[in-house]
Image (cartoon, rainbow, N blue to C red):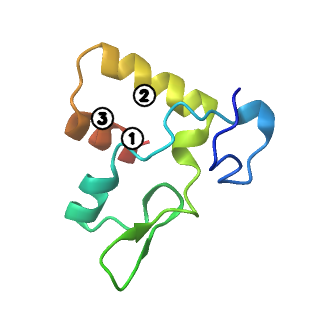
Amino acid sequence: MDKCKYFRCHDLDEDNFDCSLCYCPFYEICKEEEKYDLFGGYILKQNGLLACENCTYFHRKEIVKEYNMLKEKGLDTKELFFHFIKK
């Protein structure tokens, strides 16, 4: 894995770490739905941005694999969001 300037953004076991989704695909939806406690918790900053440093959900290999599989099947972002919040 090539190191990016943000590498080791989260403290996860390297055997379970996947950087393929280096951003949260649900960032905007979580903000819109005011779901700040999902996936490890977000912190709503005074400037209106979400700080996601407590969330490791989309850096776990099994989650990235499932996300990509469902995306390939044609689920849109909102459908994926509701799939993962039910887990």
Determine contact: label 1, label 3, CB under 8 Å: yes
Distance between mark 1 and mark 3 Cα atoms: 6 Å
Label 1 crowd (10 A; few <14 / some 14-19 / many >=20): some
Helix or strand or loop: what does disc 2 sit on?
Answer: helix
> Where residue 63 sits: x, y (%)?
53, 33
Q: Above or below — where is 28 with respect to 4?
A: below
Placement of 75 over or under 47, stated as above or below = above
Residue furthest to the bottom in view is: 46
Q: Which residue is mark 2?
A: 67
Asked whether the residues under the numbered discs 2 and 1 touch, taking CB atoms below 8 Å apart as contact, a structural biologist would say: yes
In this rendering, would 83 be left or right of 40? left
Q: Nearer the viewer, residue 17 or 87?
A: 17
Against 51, residue 46 (above or below) is: below
Few, some or many residues within 10 Å of mark 3 (<14, 14–19, 20+): some
Q: In whole angstroms, how far apart are the C-alphas of marks 3 and 2?
A: 7 Å
**Which residue is more in the foreground, 27 or 70?**
27
| Residue annotated with mark 3 | 80
- Position of 75 with respect to 40 (left or right) is left
Question: Do residues under tags 3 and 2 come within 8 Å of each other at their CB atoms?
Answer: yes
Residue 31: where, in percent of width, then height? 27, 64
Q: Which residue is mark 1?
A: 84
Q: Nearer the viewer, mark 2 or mark 1?
A: 2
Residue 68: quadrant of the picture: top left
Q: Position of residue 42 (x, y in %)?
A: 46, 67
* Side of 14 relative to 48 (left or right): right
Q: Amino acid at mark 3?
A: Leu
